[in-house]
Amino acid sequence: MRKVLLAPVVISMMATAFFLTGCSRGENPLSSKESYNIPTEGDDIMDAQLYYAGDDEEQARTIDLGFGATGSDCYVTYRRGDETVVEDKKISGEDADYLESKLIEYSKTVRDGENGYWPDTDEYPAMISIFSYRLNFLHGNEADKIDTDGATGMPSGYEEFFSDLEEKIIAAEDAASKEKESILDRILRGDVYDTDDNFFALIDEIGNSDRSYYAFVDVDSDGVEEICVKRYSEMYIIDSFDNVYKMVYDGATYDMPIDEAGLTGIFYSLPSAAPTSDTYIFRTISPEGEITSENFASWYDANENGQMDEEDWFFLDSKEEKEVTMNEWLDKAEKYQKYRDYSPWNG
């Protein structure tokens, strides 16, 4: 199905406690006496947020799904109690189509049972929601939604429906993890082209695998995750070109691949002491590994009081020749400071 959103959307659920707060009849978005539209075959699901309390409130489960702008992509976050089992995972192809079709199919069941989710009265104390079903969709060119929950009943077969989605999400996550392990093993044990188009064995470079780390991150904004490997003093970024692996970046050990809100590229963070100081460098790169932009920021706790204030030294140039004010520095560098202790590495 063709999507019309401008960008992939993932609506993150609030903490499980959001669903466990008391919800009175006046707060319930749908009374037991009113109906709502549902998606039908051919409609496009934009996003969905599902909640199921189950028998144990501490193990209540939430599923967030956001469907992409083009093709059959779905971004999923799945939580069980306080544990995030799957976070912002991209599911594509038949698996994404399956999730969308299940939502469309089950929406009729949700509507058919709407009179049984709350007591048929306006006078009762606050009650705990045991399920919620929230869905935004497009019917033709018209946006519509389902937004309902319940405290005294659930749609028929809701537990089975929810479990079916869980199994599909976990299976897709396991398959993706195995694929990454296979790719990593291939580039470690096989040959990779270096930046000069010469073969080299990556395992020879990183040595003891117990002292190397890896991450899969889309550092060049091309929609495909690159393989990033860190050893003692270097960090490599390896990309695939027609199933041939090539190292496109060879940097320092403090370089880190990053793809977080507003920052996609290579992030260098070096906190120091005596006096306290921070140095940040953020670079964007092309799919070929060329640096396309570079931003620098450093701060020194000049008065050694252990906190940032206007008496400290602030620089935005790499040679640290021109001081700027704290406000000028924060305007440019506060977004880097958020990731002062960031680490993407596994292994």
Image (tube, rainbow, N blue to C red):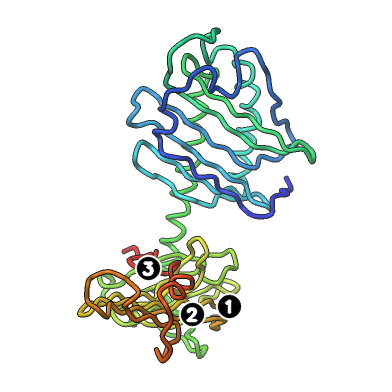
- Mark 2 or mark 3: name the one nearer the start of the chain: 3
- Mark 2 or mark 1: name the one nearer the start of the chain: 1
- Nearest the viewer among 296 and 156 is 296
Question: How far across and down, in percent of the image, does residue 161 sit?
Answer: 52, 27
Q: CA distance from mark 2 to mark 1?
A: 16 Å
Residue at (43%, 33%) from the top-left corner? 18
Residue that carries the numbered disc 2 in the rendered image: 295
Q: Is residue 23 visible?
A: yes
Question: How far across and down, in percent of the image, does residue 132 sit?
Answer: 51, 27
Residue at (60%, 29%) from the top-left corner? 147
- Nearest the viewer among 263 and 321 is 321
Residue at (64%, 20%) from the top-left corner? 111
Q: What mark, if any, has residue 286 been given in the picture?
A: 1
Residue located farthest toward the front when viewing the structure as drawn: 311
Mark 2, Cα crowd under 10 Å, few <14 / some 14-19 / many 20+, is some
Kind of residue at disc 2: Asn
- Mark 3 or mark 1: name the one nearer the start of the chain: 3
Residue that carries the numbered disc 3 in the rendered image: 214
Question: How far across and down, in percent of the image, does residue 194 sit?
Answer: 47, 85
Q: CB of mark 2 within 8 Å of CB of mark 3?
A: no
